[in-house]
Amino acid sequence: MLKKTFRLYRDHYVALLRLGVPIMIGQLGIIIVGFADNIMVGHHTSEELAAASFVNNLFNLPLMFALGFSLGLTPLIGNLVGKNQVAKAGQTLRYGLIANLLLAILLIGVMSVVYVNIDRMGQPEELLPLIKPYFLIHLSGLIFIMLFNAFKQFADGIMDTRISMYILLCGNVLNIIGNYLLIFGPGFFPELGLLGAGFSTLLSRIFTLSVFVYLFFFTSRYGRFKEGFRHLKGDSGKQLLHLTKMGMPIAFQMGMETGSFNLSVIMMGWIGTAALAAHQAVATFTTIGFMLYYGIGSAITILVSNAKGAGEMNKVRSIANAGFHVIILLAVCIVIIMALFRQQVGYLFTDSEEVNGIVALLIIPTMVYQFGDGLQVAYANALRGIGDVKPMALIAFVSYFLVCLPAAYLFGFVCRGGAMGIWWGFPIGLTLAGVMFYSRFRYKMKNSKIV
């Protein structure tokens, strides 16, 4: 049975890994830089680490929302390339950059309101002089992030995923070197502490965008798309509306998933400091698994949209199923690692016996939700590939806000399960989302007369 399945899906497995592995590596590089950031800032002063943690958590939601919006560009580009409409793909990138720029300006406005109200958020007074300038540096980087996202999703859509990996890895190396030089100030460099970490991150974001701009406009790599980018006319309002209709449901879906984890922090705080620290440790650790799934999920979107554009709808279901197989294999590996090291994971983040004990407990529901997480990543990306994004925000709202968070409160407080009870809400929410995305995908396939 396994041999027959492998023969049936073999070509799809190869294509998914060829596209997905570079995306995985690029995303894991970002996580490693985040770890390095925290370690270096923490070794400078613990107050700066606390300030960095506060600001980074505030920006998690808008950054995931921005990423979700840019993901709407990938299936549009993949569909056009599948139809061999190269000029139209270049034009779509132009409008994609405009749409991402406009959303960046909107997010800057929203986060500026947050900045004005930082004094009212109950943070320790001694941290505010550290929080405010670091916040402003992050704010100034939003435009560079979103424009980079547009270029990256364009490159992914045309199946050029390796270039994004190389650019991200170079940017990550630059960030780590900049962190060391500007945080600690060796030699003639200024010792700026947390502010130096912020400047280093900003410079790396400017660098990654600049490289993509150079490659697109000043090399032959994307030459066949430049004519459409520069000269192909179109109804600007209609094009931007189309991009918004594709991007916004994905943005809300990813934002609500991220929001369910962020809002559960409030419930953890009701239990105590140790529970809050354990939540942060496990959430950070599990990001690695999510990013691996995200790499294969992005490859599913690319291949499905390309097949749809080429009129090869008979391949769509098998691509999505093959992607789910790969993700589940990754999930099994991750669960085994968690099972083997759950008693030690907490010590990566703290020396506290109490926190480590809670981390070991939280990893149990974390292992359980890997299947649901893999299911929702695979078929959410398949739906993006066929352009069926409108139901995604509703499914996310039901799964994460109407089911996951209330279940977390029920198990954590009504049933007195504590921190572990709160985390049992996640397997329920993620699995429900996965089942609903899968059901929607099956419905669309049947509706397309694909058996």
Image (cartoon, helix red, strand yellow):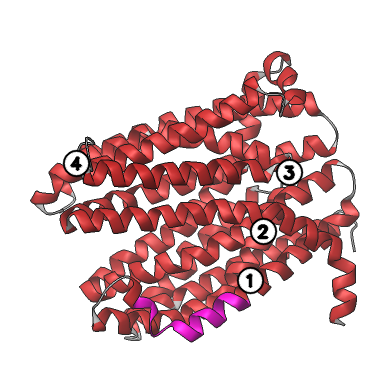
Q: Give the foreground label among 4 and 3.
A: 4
The amino acid type of the residue labelled 2 equals Ile
Q: Check if mark 3's residue and mark 2's residue have beta carbons within 8 Å.
A: no
Q: Earlier in the sequence, mark 3 or mark 2?
A: 3
Q: Give the residues drawn in magenta, as a range.
A: 332-346
Circle on res. 296: 2
Q: Which residue is mark 4?
A: 191
Crowding at mark 2 (Cα within 10 Å: few <14, some 14-19, many 20+): many
Q: Check if mark 2's residue and mark 1's residue have beta carbons within 8 Å.
A: yes
Q: Which residue is mark 3?
A: 159
Q: Earlier in the sequence, mark 4 or mark 3?
A: 3
Q: Earlier in the sequence, mark 2 or mark 1?
A: 2
Quadrant for the N terminus, please: bottom right
Residue 389: x and y in percent read 66, 48
The amino acid type of the residue labelled 3 equals Met
Marks 2 and 1, Cα distance to the nearest angstrom?
10 Å
- Left/right placement of residue 5 relative to residue 45 reads right
Give the residue drawn at x 60%, y 39%.
152
**Residue 439 figure quarter:** bottom right
Identify whether 369 is placed above or below 290.
below
